[in-house]
């Protein structure tokens, strides 16, 4: 991921220094277990920890010649450790190091993403409670439907991201898996106790059947969950972008002092942050299909998945981390215009209350078909001619047989639409 959309905390996970440090710890912990089993001298395992090290530039230089990253790393490590390095990597294969390392990195990334989600959830909750009873129009097909509140809108997003956090916690647990099983995963050259020791030291579970690699269904689930989170971010971003449209202007991204929206039009205040999030969501989601295609590898292993994961591992987690942090900032500083929300509620001359009239007429004795026709014939002139819905209803002789003018007035009370807001908030946020 380019620096423009990267945060240092997530970038560090994917830097060579962190990757090689994890490789070193895998090898060193494996040496400890091998020493306990009597496979290698205890002095050799001790030497790995005491003298072990690596040089990134040296590894790159060696790899340029040998065309194998793990061999290049082991060669660099041996230059630090000395003669005892011959006992390193005993009975192991490259995938033992690579796959276990990737599990650690994805676990580290998931921990940051979970913290990001906590921050976003906190922002959504705070703003939802703040605008719990701020009336706004609900839209279906982008057209005015019935009243809701801005707090209910945000509570819905809170519930969605809470589900996403739960999914990510499950995906993190599933991906945190260790495989130290040797060629084709049979443990022929290495004792399963080594795998268990390394897993314990790194905070991982063991892979029951690794076939030389960790099965990629685990990774597919992980990246699919990231894709779902990205889709939820886009849904929230699109909501903000729509609400910021000049014709709507119910909410707006914070516009800082000195910020400029256009190189040519000084008046512009554009929703650039949520547009960025929308774009990043497309990238993260785009990595899901390659992750799914990685599941079907040949026999006990091939490396067609490797090039994919070297791209989607960093890019998906870095991009999603940035998008979550940016969205938290957007929600924290979101400018909200209750007066414009009320103006939009009033824009259609009361049509947002049409269902209440429809239902009340059926309660009073009209058939549903007659009621629908009566309400619709009074609604259309409001759409087409800008007339007042309430006055048209009061002037309709067929409706007048069932509803008095005061009863019609009662059907236009906004409080009707807010009577269960507390129930919704209790379901979402609890006590």
Image (cartoon, rainbow, N blue to C red):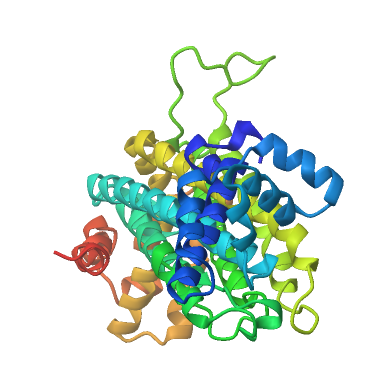
Q: Position of residue 367 (x, y in %)?
A: 41, 87
Please identify the quarter of the rendering in which residue 408 is found: bottom left
Q: Which of the pair 378/84 is nearer the observer?
A: 84
Q: Where residue 40 sits in the image (x, y, percent)?
A: 53, 68
Q: Where is residue 88, by image quadrant?
A: bottom right
- Residue sitting at x 28%, y 72%: 403
Q: Position of residue 49 (x, y in %)?
A: 46, 51
Using residue 293 as the reference point, say whether residue 232 is left or right of it.
Answer: left
With 277 as the anchor, is 164 left or right in this view? Answer: left
Residue at position x 75%, y 72% in the image: 293
Q: Quadrant of the N terminus?
A: top right
Horizontal side, residue 206 vs residue 89: left or right: left
Between 405 and 202, the one nearer to me in the picture: 202
Q: Nearer the viewer, residue 329 or 404?
A: 329
Query: Residue at position x 22%, y 58% from top?
Result: 415
Q: Is residue 318 above or below residue 108?
A: above
Which residue sits at x=30%, y=77%? 402
Residue 396 in view: no
Residue 219, picture quadrant: bottom right
Q: From the image, which quarter does the C terminus lie in?
A: bottom left
């Amino acid at each position: 991921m380019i620096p423009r959309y990267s945060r240092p905390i997530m970038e560090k996970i994917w830097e060579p220094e962190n990757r090689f440090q994890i490789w070193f710890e895998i090898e060193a912990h494996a040496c400890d277990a091998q020493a306990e089993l009597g496979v290698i001298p205890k002095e050799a395992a001790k030497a790995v920890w005491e003298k072990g090290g690596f040089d990134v530039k040296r590894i790159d230089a060696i790899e340029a010649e040998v065309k194998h990253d793990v061999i290049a790393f082991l060669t660099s490590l041996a230059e630090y450790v000395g003669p005892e390095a011959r006992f390193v990597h005993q009975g192991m294969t490259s995938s033992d190091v690579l796959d276990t390392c990737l599990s650690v990195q994805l676990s580290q990334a998931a921990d940051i993403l979970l913290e990001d989600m906590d921050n976003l959830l906190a922002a959504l909750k705070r703003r939802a409670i703040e605008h719990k009873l701020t009336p706004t129009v609900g839209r279906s097909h982008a057209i005015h439907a019935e009243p809701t509140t801005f707090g209910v809108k945000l509570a819905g997003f809170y519930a969605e991201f809470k589900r996403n956090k739960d999914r990510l916690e499950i995906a993190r647990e599933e991906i945190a898996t260790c495989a130290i099983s040797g060629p084709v995963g049979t443990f022929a050259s290495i004792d399963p106790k080594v795998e268990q020791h390394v897993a314990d030291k790194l905070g991982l579970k063991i892979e029951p059947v690794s076939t030389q690699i960790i099965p990629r269904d685990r990774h597919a689930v992980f990246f699919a969950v990231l894709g779902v989170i990205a889709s939820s971010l886009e849904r929230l971003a699109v909501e903000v972008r729509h609400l910021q449209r000049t014709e709507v202007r119910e909410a707006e991204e914070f516009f800082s002092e000195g910020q400029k929206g256009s190189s040519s039009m000084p008046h512009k205040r554009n929703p650039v942050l949520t547009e960025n999030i929308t774009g990043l969501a497309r990238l993260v989601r785009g990595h899901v299909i390659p992750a799914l295609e990685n599941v079907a590898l040949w026999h006990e292993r091939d490396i067609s998945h490797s090039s994919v994961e070297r791209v989607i591992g960093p890019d998906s987690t870095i991009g999603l981390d940035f998008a979550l942090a940016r969205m938290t900032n957007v929600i924290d500083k979101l400018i909200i215009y209750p007066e414009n929300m009320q103006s939009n509620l009033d824009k259609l001359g009361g049509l947002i209350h049409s269902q209440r009239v429809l239902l009340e007429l059926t309660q009073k004795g009209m058939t549903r078909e007659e009621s629908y026709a009566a309400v619709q014939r009074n609604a259309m002139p409001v759409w087409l001619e800008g007339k007042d819905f309430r006055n048209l209803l009061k002037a309709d002789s067929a409706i007048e047989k069932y509803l008095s003018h005061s009863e019609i007035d009662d059907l236009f009370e906004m409080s009707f639409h807010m009577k269960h807001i507390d129930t919704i908030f209790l379901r979402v946020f609890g006590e």
